[in-house]
Amino acid sequence: MLEVKDLHVTVEGSEILKGLSLTVNAGEVHAIMGPNGAGKSTLSAVIAGKDGYEVTSGSITFEGRDVLEMEIEERAQAGLLLGFQYPVEIPGVKNIYLLKAALNAQRVARGEGEIPAPEFMKLVKEKINFMKMDSSFLQRAVNEGFSGGEKKRNEILQMLVLQPKLAMLDEIDSGLDIDAMKVVAQGVNSLRDPERGILIVTHYQRLLDHVEPDVVHVLVDGRIVKSGDKDLALELESRGYDWLVEESAA
Amino acid sequence: MASQEMEQLVRREYKQGFVTDIESDTMPPGLDENTIAFISHKKGEPEWMLEWRLDAYRQWLKMTSPSWAHLDYPPIDYQAISYYSAPKKPEDRPQSLDEVDPKLLETYEKLGIPLHERAALAGVAVDAVFDSVSVTTTFKEKLSEAGVIFCSISEAIRNYPELVKQYMGTVVPKGDNYFAALNSAVFTDGSFVFVPEGVTCPMELSTYFRINAANTGQFERTLIICEKQAQVSYLEGCTAPMRDENQLHAAVVELVALEDAYIKYSTVQNWYPGDEDGKGGIYNFVTKRGDCRGDRSRISWTQVETGSAITWKYPSCVLRGKDSVGEFYSVAVTNNRQQADTGTKMIHIGENTRSTIVSKGISAGRANQSYRGLVKIGPRAKNARNFTQCDSLLIGDQCGAHTFPYQEIGNSTATVEHEATTSKIGEDQLFYCQSRGISEEDAVNMIVNGFCKDVFQELPMEFAVEAEALLNVTLEGAVG
Ligand SMILES: Nc1ncnc2c1ncn2[C@@H]1O[C@H](COP(=O)(O)OP(=O)(O)OP(=O)(O)O)[C@@H](O)[C@H]1O
Ligand SMILES: [Mg+2]
């Protein structure tokens, strides 16, 4: 469903992605690992449409559509959803209001019409319970004063409510305590579906112990230098990245 | 999103009000004692009123225009202004909504203005179109049953001279400030409300007023009196855009609350702000003051200001009575070249007096906005308390927000708290919302409305809904 081909991306004059290719099919869970600064967040940001990234060559298509031609909100409406590494705070806007606005925007774009309020409340209640979050989070301003872990749970909550076709999760596991890690992993697993693709950016095997990936990629210096199955992640855990960095330089 | 785009986003064309070039019964420009005598005569006023006006005029002549505000505008030529224009005759007005600019109608629609009010707001000759007269009559009957007097200030001067004499100018004295003095000399219209002892006004004073507001003069004068234990909620202005050929507006509003009385005064102001360069916009210099004269009385100002090229306005409360309460809730939006210098004064005189100030300022484009608040605690104001919350939201990076909190504390038992924040609608916030499928425009609206929530919830229900819609329309357009 997602196809990235020979993608070159420049940020403020320097090339960050240097010919990256990646294919995610429906039903698959992909993990992207790699050293700090390799370009993992850049990749997900470019797919989501963040400003300030110049695509100098290459392409991104999602279900046959040229993603680079789509507005940010159109990408989300088409089912591409990014869970942020650093979710932003929006004072004054209630969490539940954002959820509802987002869901309705997506539904309206798909021609489904807005969700009736009781149905929405039921849906949100179910999902928030699943994420073991207190319902008071719905009434609080988006991410405002949330702890690091609470922000991450909130990102997954949005995924569960919005039900994207392709979920991209950027370091959704960083800053989580052990229990929260399990809850977040459960959330991600509940998204697993033959119709859905999942792309996880992570540094740790911990998350992958709970969410078993179908494919593991290693991103080094703007390129995917190695792909393999879940065992590749285990290998990285024990050997680090140096051997791959050398291999790719050779 | 680049800041240029951000600017694009907030740039919007004013949904223009109705303009007509049919001549009305207008006095030639110029101001002297004859002008004032003419106005007074046209209004059929008694001699004492004319004397009152002339006294104000003589004081005004000795005053100079205030220069302390954070505003920038060319000097006003008071001799170039015409001070009297009779209401338009029905035959000179559009005869039906079909003759009205469809754009304006579209705006009314977006704002959810009730159908029967649209015609009046658009300046349509009301009698020809619908039965607002009977609506008005029903209102009047209900009010008079309750003993409430609600009429134009001119009528009040003729029919209730004793009440007017007793109260007018006691809250805002004739020579209070430059613009108040000018208003006292030349005011042509406005409202008068009197709620007798123990009476709660049976309705919000809004609809009736809004219909009349279509012909609001440039020098309005409003006087509201609540006797002991009386209550009233008064709604001024409307969210519908209004165009006015008069560039200068200098209104005076006086509120008097006796023991245990409560006056709630809500304003939504959306006058023409001028084009992108600020040309043609209204200058709005208003003096609004409430006097909590009786013990346990309460006066509450709520305002949503989105219009005008220049706004100079500080609704204030004088807390004279023991345990009296003053409140000020404000949302001010400035865009393009708009300038606003607004805020409030809370003057604590009596014991245990309390005041709350919540001010939300939104600046976009190249607009400038200042909050100026004075909290003054007099020597007798034992245990007086004030809480001030003053927040600014910036959209884009060419606009400005300034906060000038003044405190004069003359009693050591007083508690005065001030909190202030300035935030920016960040590109990160917009990206976050957009990446959830919400359009840029909706994201801005969502953030702005969230920012203003504390104030909107103070507005009467029907106004709150309109105010929210107004902000959306105000910041609408020109995305991408
Ligand atoms: N706006 C920017 N301006 C300049 N450099 C940038 C910008 N955004 C990203 N970069 C650079 O691009 C490189 C890749 O950053 P990116 O955030 O994609 O890395 P990452 O793989 O997600 O790293 P981490 O594991 O630390 O999250 C880094 O060197 C970073 O400094
Ligand atoms: Mg990253």
Image (tube, coloured by chain):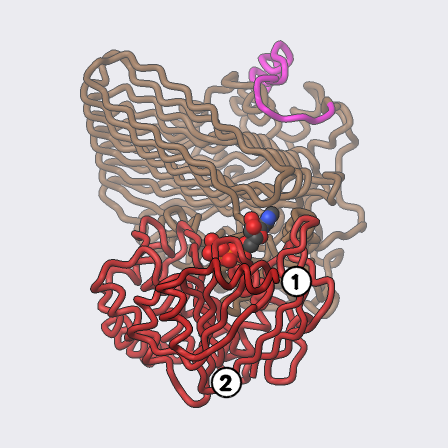
Q: Is mark 1 within 8 Å of ligand 1?
A: no
Which quarter of the picture shows residue B169? top left
Q: Which chain is red?
A: A
Range of residues picked out in magenta: B54-74
Chain name for mark 2: A
What main secondary structure does the magenta stretch of the protein show? loop
Using a 10 Å C-alpha cutoff, classify the residue at mark 1 as few (fewer than 14 neighbours), some (14 to 19) or many (20 or more). many
Magenta highlight on residue A249 = no
Q: Is residue B278 visible?
A: yes
User: Residue B116: where, in percent of width, then height?
Assistant: 55, 67
> Which residue corresponds to mark 1?
A18
Label whose residue precedes the other's in the sequence (2 or 1): 1
The residue wearing badge 2 is A112
Quadrant, the N terminus of chain A: bottom right
Identify the subunit bearing mark 1. A
Q: Nearer the viewer, residue B13 or A241?
A: A241
CA neighbours of label 2 inside 10 A, class few (<14), some (14 to 19), many (20+): few
Q: Colour of chain B?
A: brown
Q: Nearer the viewer, residue B98 or B344?
A: B344
Would you say residue B446 is visible in this rendering? Answer: no
Position above or below: B6 against B291: below
Q: x%, y% of residue A35?
A: 48, 57
Examine the image and state in which quarter residue A141 appears. Answer: bottom left
Any magenta on residue B57?
A: yes
Of badges 2 and 1, nearer the viewer stands 1
Report the residue at 56% width, 78% height from top: A78
